[in-house]
Amino acid sequence: MFAVLIRLELATPAGDLVESNVYNKFFTMHGIIMVFFLFDSVDSRNPRQFMLPMMIGAKDLAFSAD
């Protein structure tokens, strides 16, 4: 959502969709959320790496980080 709003703001030269301080907040929140999801998916201690194969009866997940 933040990425879409950032791109909509940058689509016009005037940049009149949101104010500059709101744009800065969108940009910061987008960065924080993306870093959180990156570290969440890279973390090998993530419970989904262990629980999902047991739940579906598979030996391991395809493309697992381990």
Image (cartoon, rainbow, N blue to C red):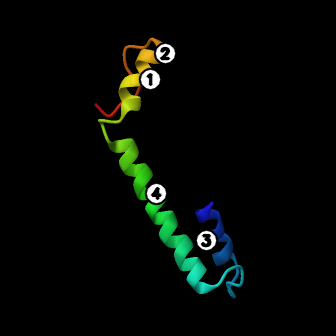
Foreground disc of the pair 3, 2: 2
Q: Mark 3 points at which residue?
A: 6
Q: Quadrant of residue 52?
A: top left
Callout 1, which amino acid? Leu
Left-right relation of 34 to 46: right
Task: Return the mark for residue 11.
Answer: none
Q: Tell me whether circle 3 and circle 2 mark residues in contact (CB < 8 Å).
A: no
Q: What element carries label 4?
A: helix
Q: Earlier along the polypeptide chain: callout 1 or callout 4?
A: 4
Quadrant of the frame with the N terminus:
bottom right
Left-right relation of 43 to 54: left
Q: Quadrant of residue 6?
A: bottom right
Q: Quadrant of residue 7?
A: bottom right
Q: Is mark 1 on a helix, strand or loop?
A: helix
Foreground disc of the pair 1, 3: 1
Count of numbered circles in the view: 4
Task: State whether residue 65 is above or below residue 3.
Answer: above
Point 36% across, 49% down: residue: 39
Task: From the top left corner, tell me how far across and down residue 41 is, in percent.
Answer: 40, 42
Point 53% across, 75% down: residue: 25
Task: From the top left corner, tell me how far across and down residue 62 is, in percent.
Answer: 41, 25
Task: Return the mark for residue 56.
Answer: 2
Q: Name the residue under label 4.
A: 34
Q: Name the residue under label 1.
A: 52
- What is the C-alpha distance between the residues marked 2 and 4? 28 Å
Packing grade of label 2 (10 A; few <14, some 14-19, many >=20) is few
